[in-house]
Image: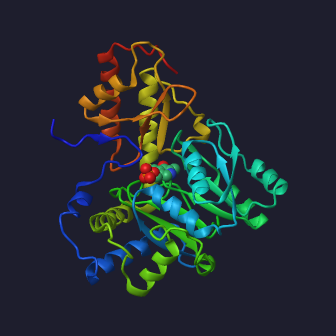
Amino acid sequence: MNRDPILLTPGPLTTSLRTKVAMLRDWGSWDSDFNAVTAGVRKSLLDIVHGHESHVVVPLQGSGTFSVEAAVETIVPRTGHVLVLDNGAYCKRAAKLTTLMGRKCTLLPFEEAQAVPPTALERKLKEDPSITHVILIHCETGTGVLNPLAEISAICEAHGKGLIVDAMSSFAALPIDARTMPFDALIAASGKCLEGVPGMGFVFIRKSLIDQCAGNSLSLAMDLHDQYVYMEKTGQWRFTPPTHVVVALAEAIAQFEEEGGQPARLARYRRNYKILVQGLQKLGLKPFLDPAIQAPIIVTFHAPADPRYDFKKFYDATKRQGIIIYPGKLTQIETFRVGCIGAINDVEMKQSINAIGQALAELGVSVGTGK
Ligand SMILES: *Cc1c(COP(=O)(O)O)cnc(C)c1O
């Protein structure tokens, strides 16, 4: 089969032909035409979070994690103390990079099958006044759970703590409004719900903080203050920009806006999610999370109990059917994950359900009657 597979993964994900075609051109990094693309992308990104009044946006080369690391490096003073609200794998990654950056870091652990409870943050902040910043993962992609951004933001505001939000897998799909849910920094990337290709991240930084971020970073490449100052002055990226990624993102954003922006994207992902869960439940597969805390981004399913089930074989069998799924990320129980995001809709979701059913049949795995 020489058609592209359907990527049911949380990035890279399936992109439209229009987005792919946008990459068939070379751009000079000093060229004013390319600088205009960068400026247009930055403007559109601020539109999405209603952040023109309150925030600046600083793009950065690399995968999403590069931008999370850069945000911590740039925002948190070297003497800062970061509290990570931990209900999954990406929370642990944020804590690890914070520690490696030499910042004091405390983990506040929760169950992976639970959203972060705001009251626990309230209690912790009262208990330990040395905490200066809080990191929240908006949608914890490790499980698919949606964390309560608005409530956590309100608590950080009330206590005068800086909030850093990893909104990598939620940005552009779930509502984020800088006017009503303030944050010091919020991070996302090109290759997730904007449906661009991977290769750059971006960080929204509170305008009133940007000047005091000078000198925080111990890294040159990760210094978003430096990147910001240079970009404001020259319109250019500090170091070689991922030119093709930027133009593909501009094209992906144009399609996002034509589709109807964030509400329309969320509606499409919700439809994908519903079709997916109903279809796989019919095959006897069970979602891991309570639907009340599930984001329509990526769904964790329990692996079938049948001993003939083996993730690698299952993966290969679904791949032969033209779809790519994702391994589970839970330490305790065996699961697999299926994404609902990307330039896909009900047609691809139904095709994927058929493919998964076929794959299970091929392996001779029985999953019972489900529910
Ligand atoms: C995708 C993702 C990241 C970034 O991962 P990369 O592999 O570096 O792109 C970070 N946080 C969350 C919640 C994500 O979903």
Q: Quadrant of residue 208?
A: bottom right
Q: Nearer the viewer, residue 312 or 190?
A: 312
Looking at the image, can residue 138 be seen? no
Q: Quadrant of the N terminus?
A: top left
- Left or right side of 167 for 356: left
Relative vertical location of residue 156 with respect to residue 96 in this rendering, above or below: below
Q: Quadrant of residue 212?
A: bottom right
Identified at 15% across, 40% down, the residue is 2
Identified at 36% across, 80% down, the residue is 236
Percent coordinates x, y for residue 22 in the rendering: 23, 64
How many labels sit on residues? Answer: 0
Percent coordinates x, y for residue 336 in the rendering: 45, 31
Q: Nearer the viewer, residue 101 or 271?
A: 101
Percent coordinates x, y for residue 292 in the rendering: 61, 39
Q: Nearer the viewer, residue 369 or 102?
A: 102
- Outermost residue toward the right in this view: 127
Identified at 51% across, 44% down, the residue is 141
